[in-house]
């Protein structure tokens, strides 16, 4: 969704609400997005600033980093950004939009920075057997003995 920033700043409107869906670029994210991302929010003039705020929700699939099992995740992110028309050292985290504010770009940047890097299927995930690669969470035992060690144990007992 594109909003003409100059026209919004000159208008008498204090707020512009938006709601739309878009498909995030697969090559930008390290997960497989299922369907579209739903974005809802507003562009607000507040004093001498323009603020972009809202939320994005999407569903994605990835794999467990311990056992490689597929995982489906629902992800919701709330965002808020100051919008500026040229780079400014005072607001290094601001969204820069010269003429048109393309909301999908700002939202995609937020998704890249906020989707977790590590995914675990459950807190009790035992991972893979270091000898044969079998999934230790399955009921079929690989036959190898696995010593459970606590790396935080000071005395190594």
Image (cartoon, grey):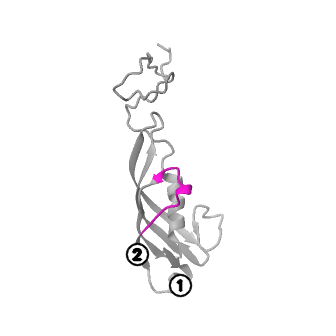
Q: Is residue 30 magenta?
A: yes
Q: What is the quadrant of residue 63 in the picture?
A: top left
| Residue 71 percent location from the top left of the image | 40, 44
In the rendered image, residue 141 lying in the magenta stretch gets the answer no
Mark 1 to mark 2: distance in Å? 15 Å
Q: Which quadrant holds residue 87? A: bottom right
Residue topped by disc 1: 7
Q: Front-most of 54 and 82?
A: 54
Q: Which residues are magenta?
A: 21-32
Structural crowding at the residue carrying mark 2, measured as other residues with C-alpha within 10 Å and reported as few (<14), some (14–19) or many (≥20): few
**x then y, percent, for residue 156:** 50, 15
Q: Is residue 82 above or below residue 15?
A: above
Contact (CB < 8 A) between labels 1 and 2? Answer: no
**Left of 100 or right of it: where is 43?**
left
Task: Using residue 3 as the reference point, say whether residue 136 is left or right of it.
Answer: left
Going from N to C along the chain, the mark reached first, 1 or 2, is 1
Label 2 residue SS: strand
Q: For mark 2, what is the residue?
A: 17
Q: Position of residue 5 (x, y in %)?
A: 54, 79
Q: Is residue 127 above or below residue 50?
A: above
Instruction: Tell me what residue is drawn at x 44 percent, y 18 percent.
Output: 146
- Which residue is pictured at 51% across the width and 45% down the height? 117
Most foreground residue, 147 or 18: 147
x 46%, y 19%: residue: 149
Determine whether 59 is above or below 81 in the image: above
Other residues around mark 1 within 10 Å, as few (<14) / some (14–19) / many (≥20): few
Q: How many marks?
A: 2
């Amino acid at each position: 969704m594109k909003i003409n920033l100059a026209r919004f700043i000159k208008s008498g409107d204090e707020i512009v609400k938006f709601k739309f869906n878009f498909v995030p670029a697969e090559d930008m994210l390290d997960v497989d997005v299922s369907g579209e991302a739903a974005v809802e929010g507003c562009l607000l003039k507040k004093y001498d600033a323009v603020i972009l705020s809202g939320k994005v929700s999407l569903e994605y699939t990835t794999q467990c980093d311990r056992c490689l099992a597929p995982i489906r995740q629902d992800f919701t992110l709330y965002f808020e950004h100051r919008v500026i028309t040229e780079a400014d050292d005072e607001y290094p985290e601001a969204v820069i939009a010269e003429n048109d504010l393309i909301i999908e770009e700002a939202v995609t940047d937020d998704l890249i920075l906020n989707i977790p890097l590590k995914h675990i299927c459950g807190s009790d995930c035992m991972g893979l057997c270091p000898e044969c690669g079998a999934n230790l969470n399955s009921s079929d035992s690989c036959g190898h003995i696995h010593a459970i060690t606590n790396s935080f144990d000071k005395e190594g007992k």
